[in-house]
């Protein structure tokens, strides 16, 4: 038996639209949609996937993020103009191999493995802050040149963080969170309600973060932490397992922010949504809706993560 030994089949936004237009009889097999059809169907497709988010977001839009604490900062923003954070999968952590003076652009670290020019880099300074800039060049196995000099002295063995791109998306939910200490030990953070957060008498009390209140917004989301990080906590990192938004279909060649098993349900349910515009009704519309609904229910049933149920006593302050 000669199989392909390949499992990387993928479609684009316009592939889904063409499939849908064929299902409603708007174009012939192998036909080309008009510019207006592509624009209209793209708009409907984006509205459809945003609506589907109300059904419950799936496991593949859950991601592990790293938030870098800032001394005396209690509120952090998820979004295009948000605070410095990255995907855990992109984070590289190393340490300075030798002290660095204020304004220096060349630093020596334990290892530059996995780093590249233009990556974001953060160096912990003696002011217990993180100086962020980008890598100008990776000079050898231990030496980096920074695009901008550090803004304070940095001690030998201070931590250095690099990642490819900052995470700039709005977050819909924080599922759980924890602090990773300088000893690389994880300490859980409790998610609390708005009422519990507002009841805290001193919201600027310093210490290691152990509670977090999340507030989603339209374009950005906010998280308030308590206690507020102090000098001894800026070398620690906050990890959050979050639920993000589905990405938009902005261009013809965009691939779906969905696994392969969702391609057919996307096409059939887009066909259901556009059918009235193309005069499809009666038996054919019922057939499209029935089969499209069945396809979505099928993939819905196994695109969720199995979780345990935990009971937590009420917290009083």
Image (spheres, rainbow, N blue to C red):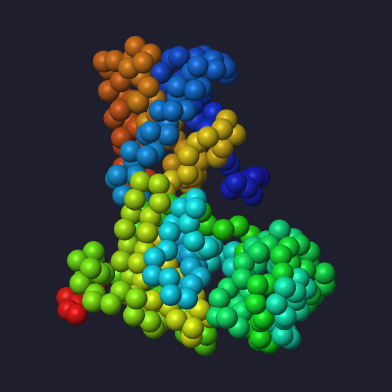
Q: Residue at x 54, y 28 (%)?
A: 14
Given residues 259 and 77, the one toward you in this image is 77
Q: In the rendered image, is residue 296 in sight?
A: no
In this rendering, the answer to whether 127 lies above or below 266 is below
Given residues 1 and 55, the one toward you in this image is 55
Quadrant that contains the C terminus: bottom left
Q: Residue at x 43, y 59 (%)?
A: 77
Q: In the rendered image, is residue 290 in sight?
A: yes
Residue 204 percent location from the top left of the image: 34, 76
Residue 239 percent location from the top left of the image: 45, 71
In this rendering, the answer to whether 79 lies above or below 92 is above
Given residues 217 and 39, the one toward you in this image is 217
Q: Residue at x 49, y 61 (%)?
A: 83
In the picture, measured across the screen, residue 31 lies left or right of residue 208, that is right
Q: Quadrant of residue 200?
A: bottom left
In this rendering, the answer to whether 221 lies above or below 10 is below
Q: Quadrant of residue 164?
A: bottom right
């Amino acid at each position: 038996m000669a199989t392909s030994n390949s499992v990387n089949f993928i479609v684009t936004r316009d592939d889904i639209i063409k499939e849908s237009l064929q299902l409603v009889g708007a174009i012939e097999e192998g036909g080309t949609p008009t510019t207006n059809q592509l624009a209209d169907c793209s708009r409907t497709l984006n509205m459809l996937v945003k609506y589907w988010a109300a059904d419950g977001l799936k496991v593949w839009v859950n991601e592990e993020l790293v938030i870098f604490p800032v001394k005396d900062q209690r509120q952090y923003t998820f979004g295009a103009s948000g605070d410095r954070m990255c995907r855990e999968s992109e984070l590289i952590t190393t340490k300075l191999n030798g002290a660095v003076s204020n304004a220096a652009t060349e630093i020596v670290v334990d290892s530059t493995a996995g780093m590249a020019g233009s990556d974001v880099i953060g160096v912990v300074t003696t002011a217990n802050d993180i100086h962020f800039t980008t890598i100008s060049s990776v000079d050898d196995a231990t030496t980096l040149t920074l695009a901008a000099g550090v803004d304070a002295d940095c001690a030998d063995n201070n931590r250095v963080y690099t990642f490819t791109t900052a995470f700039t998306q709005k977050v819909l939910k924080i599922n759980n969170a924890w602090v990773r200490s300088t000893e690389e030990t994880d300490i859980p953070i409790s998610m609390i309600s708005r009422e519990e957060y507002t009841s805290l008498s001193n919201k600027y009390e310093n210490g290691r973060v152990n509670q977090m209140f999340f507030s989603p917004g339209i374009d950005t989301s906010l998280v308030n932490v308590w206690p507020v990080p102090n000098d001894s906590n800026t070398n620690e990192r906050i990890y959050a397992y979050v639920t993000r938004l589905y990405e938009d279909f902005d261009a013809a060649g965009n691939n779906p922010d969905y696994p392969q098993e969702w391609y057919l349900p996307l096409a059939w349910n887009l066909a259901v949504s556009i059918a009235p515009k193309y005069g499809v009704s009666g038996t054919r519309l019922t057939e499209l809706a029935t089969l499209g609904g069945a396809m979505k229910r099928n993939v819905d049933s196994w695109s969720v993560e199995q979780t345990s149920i935990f009971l937590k006593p009420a917290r009083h302050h």
